[in-house]
Image: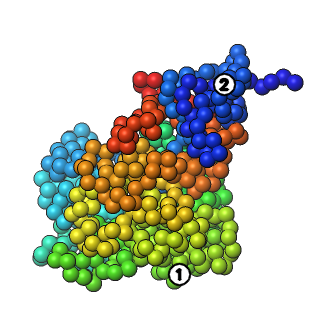
């Protein structure tokens, strides 16, 4: 019998398999886009005249990273607009806005985003500052968490927003002492201006997707779950970009699309979701998840909490945040979605939203039995200790965004004082969830924060931002490096139902990443210095670092 030779042979470095049965090897072979052998010198016997031998030169080979919660098309589009990321200096924001406006004189609207709430007193910038930069055209800039927007006077005027405009039920217009709009729009109020923006074309969205894909592959990401594909409630529908890229083969990543659950509708939207799942699932795209945004964010007091927020004096207010979907109705919706085989992907940031999501999963389990739908809860900023054990009991995955679990002004100035010391200690309890037996997955929420898995792993292990201060944030909730890596590989692969990825074992797809150093070989404080050298999807190289 003729022995089949490998297409690819990786050798000369550690192979970090993320497989508990064999955590390390020194060689790996790939044939037909699948891993055919993992081991040591014996794997070299699979080399033949046509085999491409990749000398790792001491660099580690790992499974490709997967992002369990990302907004790739939106992030890619924003990369081509007025980009305010990478700084917290208000003067630099305005310089970039002015420069962008000057460079695009024909643009009717100046759009973009990425500014940080910590840059402004109370987290709320003013329209007057934007007016000074661009007085003659409307400006609309989304903040980095995408739960608020900064608008200038011209944009407010075009939207008809005045002191007499009521707040929408799911948002807030920030106002000055006289009741006049300040230019900051929270949550559902964003749509009051956002609906006036010039419509983006399918070509714009496809270009954004491909721009994002190139960046994500460069970070070692081979698959992801886009947390908002068919948008509504003011969010854009980016499904046509994925459909086009899946059809013509330009989508090289494997993508799970989370279909948006409209909070303005009820169970009557399920037939539409079933149609979208059937219509959009093709090639590397599977729209098998439904995203339910149950609450907002803590910094603007819209995350749903079990107890009221505090005011600046430390006294309880009348506000406990927003549950965007009635919790009683939520249980019925999730039960129905689960019965149709949908995964449910929750945005649940406050402890009340986490509890409401878990209650909904529990209702679905009781009604439908245990189905392989793999529900997951994303963000998990505040988790009541009484709910930590329910993740394992209900088979609900904890979808972490580790970069947020660190001291920074947005945490220290805009969150902790308004939560109080007891509740602040319940934030991002990754360690407790692990010890309670929960399955951990990880994502970035890019463009809300960096898409770089290495940076997320650094914070998960150190509870300190790369290059940040020395004080770790709730260090008892830190993860060990192997667990953090597993969350970005095997854990997210589990969430994405990509069971033949996430670990390096024979038969699995050859979704691979080569790093420039072994993160286990150096101190934990240096994890963030690690860079991606090569990225492969199904054995095909999709990224090569310039110094490779």
Rendered view: 381 above or below 454: below
Considering the image in quadrants, where does the N terminus appear? top right
Residue farthest top in this picture: 49
Between the residue at mark 2 and the residue at mark 1, the CA separation in whole angstroms equals 59 Å
Q: Residue at x 51, y 32 (%)?
A: 60
The relative height of residue 133 versus residue 122 in the rendered view (above or below) is above
Tell me if I can see residue 417 in this picture.
yes
Name the residue rendered at 43%, 73% in the picture: 385
Count of numbered tags: 2
Q: Residue at x 48, y 70 (%)?
A: 388
Looking at the rendered structure, the secondary structure element under dot 2 is helix
Instruction: Give whichever of 192, 401 is nearer the camera.
Output: 401
In which quarter of the view is residue 310 placed? bottom left
Q: Nearer the viewer, residue 527 or 154?
A: 527
Q: What is the x, y in percent for residue 469?
A: 24, 49
Q: Residues within 10 Å of mark 1 (few under 14, many from 20)?
A: few
The secondary structure type at the circle numbered 1 is helix
Give the label, 2 or 1, closer to the camera: 2
Which disc number belongs to residue 211?
none
Residue 212 in which image quadrant? top left
Image side of residue 106 versus residue 517, left or right: left
Q: Which residue is mark 1?
A: 329
Q: Which residue is mark 2?
A: 41
Q: Residue 472 in the image: state x and y as whole percent.
A: 30, 55
For disc 2, the neighbor class at 10 Å (few under 14, some 14 to 19, many from 20) is few
Q: Image height check: is 51 above or below 138?
A: above
User: What colour scheme does the image use?
Assistant: rainbow
Residue 33 visible (yes or no): no
Q: Nearer the viewer, residue 324 or 49?
A: 49
């Amino acid at each position: 019998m003729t022995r089949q030779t490998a297409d690819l042979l990786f050798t000369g470095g550690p192979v970090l398999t993320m497989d508990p049965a064999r955590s390390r090897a020194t060689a790996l072979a790939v044939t037909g886009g699948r891993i055919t052998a993992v081991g040591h010198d014996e794997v070299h016997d699979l080399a033949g005249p046509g085999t491409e031998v990749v000398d790792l030169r001491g660099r580690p080979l790992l499974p490709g990273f997967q992002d369990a919660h990302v907004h790739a098309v939106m992030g890619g589009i924003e990369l081509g607009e007025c980009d305010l990321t990478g700084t917290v200096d208000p003067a630099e924001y305005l310089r970039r806005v002015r420069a962008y406006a000057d460079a695009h004189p024909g643009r009717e609207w100046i759009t973009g985003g990425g500014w940080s709430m910590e840059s402004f007193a109370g987290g709320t910038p003013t329209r007057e500052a934007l007016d000074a930069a661009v007085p003659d055209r409307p400006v609309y800039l989304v903040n980095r968490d995408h739960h608020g927007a900064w608008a200038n006077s011209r944009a407010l005027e075009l939207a008809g927003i005045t002191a007499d405009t009521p707040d929408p039920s799911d948002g807030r217009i920030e106002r000055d002492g006289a009741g006049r709009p300040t230019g900051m729009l929270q949550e559902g109020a964003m749509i009051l201006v956002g609906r006036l923006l010039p419509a983006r074309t399918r070509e714009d969205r496809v270009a954004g997707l491909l721009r994002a894909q190139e960046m994500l592959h460069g970070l070692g990401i081979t698959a992801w779950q886009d947390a908002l594909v068919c948008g509504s409630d003011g969010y854009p529908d980016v499904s046509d970009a994925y459909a086009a890229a899946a059809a013509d083969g330009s989508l090289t990543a494997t993508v799970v699309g989370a279909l948006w659950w409209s909070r303005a509708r009820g169970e009557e939207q399920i037939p539409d979701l079933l149609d979208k799942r059937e219509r959009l699932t093709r090639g590397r795209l599977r729209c098998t998840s439904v995203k339910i945004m149950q609450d907002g964010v803590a910094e603007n007091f819209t995350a749903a909490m079990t107890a009221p927020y505090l005011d600046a004096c430390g006294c309880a207010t009348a506000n406990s945040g927003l549950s965007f979907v009635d919790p009683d109705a939520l249980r019925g919706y999730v039960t129905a979605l689960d019965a149709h085989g949908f995964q449910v992907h929750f945005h649940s940031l406050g402890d009340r939203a986490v509890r409401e999501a878990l209650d909904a999963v529990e209702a679905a389990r009781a009604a439908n039995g245990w189905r392989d739908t793999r529900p997951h809860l994303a963000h998990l900023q505040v988790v009541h200790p009484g709910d930590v054990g329910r993740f394992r009991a209900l088979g609900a995955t904890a979808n972490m965004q580790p970069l947020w679990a660190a001291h920074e002004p947005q945490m220290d100035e805009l969150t902790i004082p308004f939560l109080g010391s007891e509740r602040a200690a319940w934030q991002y309890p990754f360690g407790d969830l692990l010890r309670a037996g929960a399955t951990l997955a990880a994502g970035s929420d890019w463009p809300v924060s960096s898409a770089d898995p290495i940076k997320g792993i650094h914070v998960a292990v150190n509870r300190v931002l790369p290059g940040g201060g020395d004080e770790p944030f709730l260090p008892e909730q830190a993860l060990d490096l192997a667990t953090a890596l597993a969350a970005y590989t095997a854990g997210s692969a589990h969430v994405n139902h990509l069971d033949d990825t996430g670990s390096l074992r024979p038969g699995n797809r050859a979704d691979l990443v080569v790093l420039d150093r072994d993160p286990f070989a150096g101190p934990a404080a240096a994890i963030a210095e690690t860079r991606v050298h090569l990225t492969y999807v199904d054995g095909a190289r999709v990224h090569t670092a310039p110094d490779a």
